[in-house]
Amino acid sequence: MRVVQAVTGSYRAHVTRDRILTAAAVGLLLAFLWYADRTFSAYSIRILNTVAIFSIVAVTYNLINGVTGQFSLGPNAFIAVGSYTSALLTLSPQEKVGSFIIDPLIWPLSVISVSFPVSLIAAGVAAGLVAFLMSVPVFRTRGDYLAIVTLGFGEVMQVITNNAVSVTNGPLGLKGLYPYTTLWWSWGLCIFTVICTVRLVNSSYGRAMKAVREDETAAEAMGIDAFWTKTLAFTFSAFFAGVGGGLLAHLITTISPSLFTFFLTFNLLIIIVVGGLGSTTGALIGAILFAWGGEALRVVEEPFTLFGRDFPGVPGMRMVIFSAILILMMIFARSGIMSRREFSWQAAIDLGSALLARIRRTG
C-alpha cells in the first residue's frame, strides 16, 4: 500500500511540475509575442504569423496522416473552403458588389457580414462538414487508393473555385480583405490547436487512432469502429485546416484558386515527414523550419560577400539548397527529426543535467 501511495504521489508531483513548466513556457511565448508585436518589422511579423498558421494546419494534418495512418492528400481543399468562407463572411455587402464584377454573389452571402472570430468558426465548421461528407466515399478505400481519392477531391475543389464565379469570383479571387490576422490571433489559435490535438491524441480516441494505424483489422476485431475513428480524425483535421485557411486569407488579404493547388498539400506533407510522422512535436518543428528556413534561405538569391569575395545572387538557388537538405534528411533521418517521439519536460531536464555534468567534468 505504501509503495502504491509513493508511486501515486511521485506521479502527481511530476504532473504538477510539468503543468507549471508548461504554463511558464506559454508565458514566455506570450511575452515574446508582446515584444515582437512592438519592435519587429512588418516582414518579421508576417513570418511569425506564417509559422503559426503552418503549425496549426501541420499539427492537425499529422493527426490523420501520422497518428491515424491514413495517407490523405486533400488538406488544400479544406484550407480553400476555410479561406473563402471566412473571406466572404467578413467582406461588407458594398465590398462584395465591387469585387463580383462578372456575376453577382449569390444570396444570402451577398448581404451577410460578420466579425472575424465568427468567420473563423464558420470556416472551421464549413471545412469540417465537407470532410465529414467526404469521409463516406474516402474511407471505403485504403492506402494508395485513399491517397488518390483525396488528391482527386483536392483537384475538384480547385476546379470549383475556378468555375463557381457567383460564389468564389472565379479566377479573379477575392481582394481587399482586412488584415485581421495578428500575432495574437495566429499564435493564440496555434496554442489552442496544439492543446486540443495533444489532449485528443492522449485520450481513448487517440489510442483508437493509433490502433487503426498499426493494424486496422486487429483494431476492428478488438471492437474499435475504424470508420468512425478515421472520420473523427479527418473531420478534426479539416476543421482546424479551415481555421488556418481563414487566418491565411486575412494575412495575405487576397486569395485566388491558384493559392490552393496540390503544391500547398505537398509543402504540408514535407513538414510532417521531416518532423516525424505521428509526432505533434515533430509537426511543430517541421512547420517552424519550413516557414522560417524558407525565408532565411533567400539570402543566397541576393548578392553577398564571403571570405572577402563577392558572389552574385542566383535566382532559384534557395530551392536547390532546400531540396538538398530534404535529400540529406531522407538519407540520414528517414523517420524524421522526432520520429514518433514527443517532447517531455523530464527528458529535457535529464538532457540539461547531463550537459551540466559534462561541463563540470571538462571544466
Image (spheres, grey):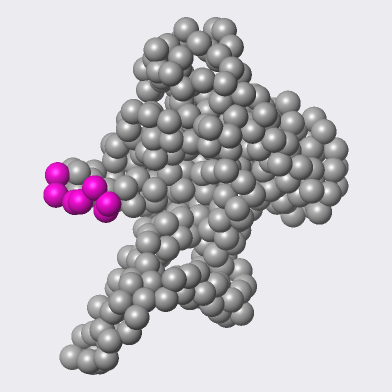
Question: What is the x, y in percent for residue 151?
Answer: 73, 46
Q: Is residue 42 magenta?
A: yes
Q: Tell me the residue at 27%/52% (across/down).
A: 43
- 336 on left or right of 195: right
Q: Tell me the residue at 40%/64% (across/down).
A: 293
Our reading of the magenta stretch's main secondary structure is helix
Question: What is the x, y in percent for residue 320?
Answer: 51, 74
- 198 on left or right of 353: right
| Viewer-closest of 11 and 347 | 347
| Viewer-closest of 306 and 69 | 306
Q: Which residues are magenta?
A: 38-44
Quarter holding residue 269: bottom right
Q: Tell me the residue at 54%/43% (across/down).
A: 259
Image: 106 above or below 67: above
Question: What is the x, y in percent for residue 352?
Answer: 30, 71
- 226 on left or right of 350: right
Image: 301 above or below 88: below
Q: Tell me the residue at 47%/43% (across/down).
A: 56
